[in-house]
Amino acid sequence: MSQMKQSVLFVCLGNICRSPLAEGLFRHHVARAGLGDRLFADSAGTGDWHSGEPPHPNSVLIAARNGIDISGQRARQLQTGDLGRFELICGMDASNVANIRALSRSTRAGNTHGKRAEIVRFMDAGSMEECDVPDPWSKGMEAYQKVFDMINSTMPRLIDRLLKAQKRVD
Ligand code: 4NP
């Protein structure tokens, strides 16, 4: 089997609400399935306003209520180099995807093997439902609960997709 881990980058606008939850939930599902040696995830924001900050307190709280600690994550901005480092980049909503694609068009970045990430909307990649994960920023706890539930229920299918892609390259 290839030693390469399949990698996914979750991207939202600020990297403090949705994509940190996606990163935390990915790690949680992957650890539970014993797949940590095969899969890797990170997260980033298309904006840089929150770089270096921990996730939003509501995201930290909703994750903690479900036994997941995301408090150690720190926000960072999406870099052109990310386009050549990950197999898959998931934007959480359509505007995130448009921003990632615009960055991709503006650069020829790819790694030395020509790897270039596939860019998809998160729910389109892992769900039967084609929709945005709505931005909960400045909304109440209910909005964060909805985001958590959408990401949590979709993550197993996204993980299956990565495992199938890994089989194709092995
Ligand atoms: P996120 O939410 O993209 O899910 O992290 C947001 C966080 C911050 C802002 C917007 C959305 N903001 O405008 O600062």
Image (tube, rainbow, N blue to C red):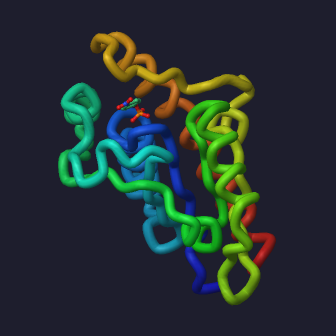
Is residue 124 positioned above or below 8 on the image? above
> Can I make out residue 25 in this image?
no
Ligand 1 is found in which quarter of the picture?
Answer: top left
The answer to which of 135 and 101 lies nearer the viewer is: 101
Q: Residue furthest front?
A: 106
Identify which residue is drawn at 42% across, 34% down: 18
> Can I make out residue 42 in this image?
yes
Q: Position of residue 31 (x, y in %)?
A: 39, 57
The answer to which of 120 and 166 lies nearer the viewer is: 120
Is residue 39 positioned above or below 23 on the image? below
The answer to which of 67 and 62 lies nearer the viewer is: 62
- Left or right: where 53 falls relative to 78: left
- Left or right: where 7 falls relative to 97: left
Q: In terms of image quadrants, where is residue 112?
A: bottom right
Identify which residue is drawn at 44% across, 62% down: 34
Q: Position of residue 7 (x, y in %)?
A: 56, 65
